[in-house]
Amino acid sequence: MVSKRLPRKAKLKERQFVLRLPENQAVFLDQLVDAGLFKSMNDSVVRIISAFISDLDNKVREAKK
């Protein structure tokens, strides 16, 4: 899977795409930004997806044991 051993200052490539969310989910993310948990809606989506992928990676590793 993906290695987490990148240098701290490494700039990862980014790719832009359109994400369509139901209104209630977008409002929820806006509330998290307003509460100061994230800098922006983009930051919230990136961090949530990163956590989700990390969790999936851990489950795959556990299943292989």
Image (cartoon, rainbow, N blue to C red):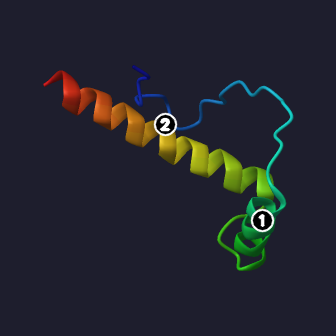
Image side of residue 12 versus residue 26, left or right: left
Name the residue located 39 percent from the left edge and 42 percent from the top edge. Answer: 55
Picture coordinates of residue 64, whole percent (x, y): 19, 22
Q: What residue type is disc 2 on?
A: Ile
What secondary structure is marked by label 1? helix
Q: Quadrant of residue 36?
A: bottom right
Q: Quadrant of residue 37?
A: bottom right
Image quadrant containing the C terminus: top left
Name the residue located 47 percent from the left edge and 28 percent from the top edge. Answer: 6
Picture coordinates of residue 63, whole percent (x, y): 21, 28
Could you tell me how many numbered marks the image carries?
2
What secondary structure is marked by label 2? helix
Picture coordinates of residue 19, whole percent (x, y): 81, 39
Which label sits on residue 16? none
Picture coordinates of residue 50, whole percent (x, y): 55, 42
Name the residue located 60 percent from the left edge and 50 percent from the top edge. Answer: 47
Q: Relative to residue 47, is residue 34 depicted above or below?
A: below
How crowded pointer 1 is (Cα within 10 Å; few <14, some 14-19, many 20+) is rated as few
Foreground pick, 39 / 18: 18
Give the spatial CA distance, label 2 vs label 1: 23 Å
Image quadrant containing the N terminus: top left
Q: Along the polypeptide, which appears first: circle 2 or circle 1?
A: 1
Image side of residue 11 versus residue 61, left or right: right
Q: Relative to residue 55, is residue 24 depicted above or below?
A: below
How crowded pointer 2 is (Cα within 10 Å; few <14, some 14-19, many 20+) is rated as few
The residue wearing badge 2 is 53
Foreground pick, 51 / 26: 26
Image side of residue 51 versus residue 55, left or right: right
The residue wearing badge 1 is 24
Name the residue located 69 percent from the left edge and 65 percent from the top edge. Answer: 38
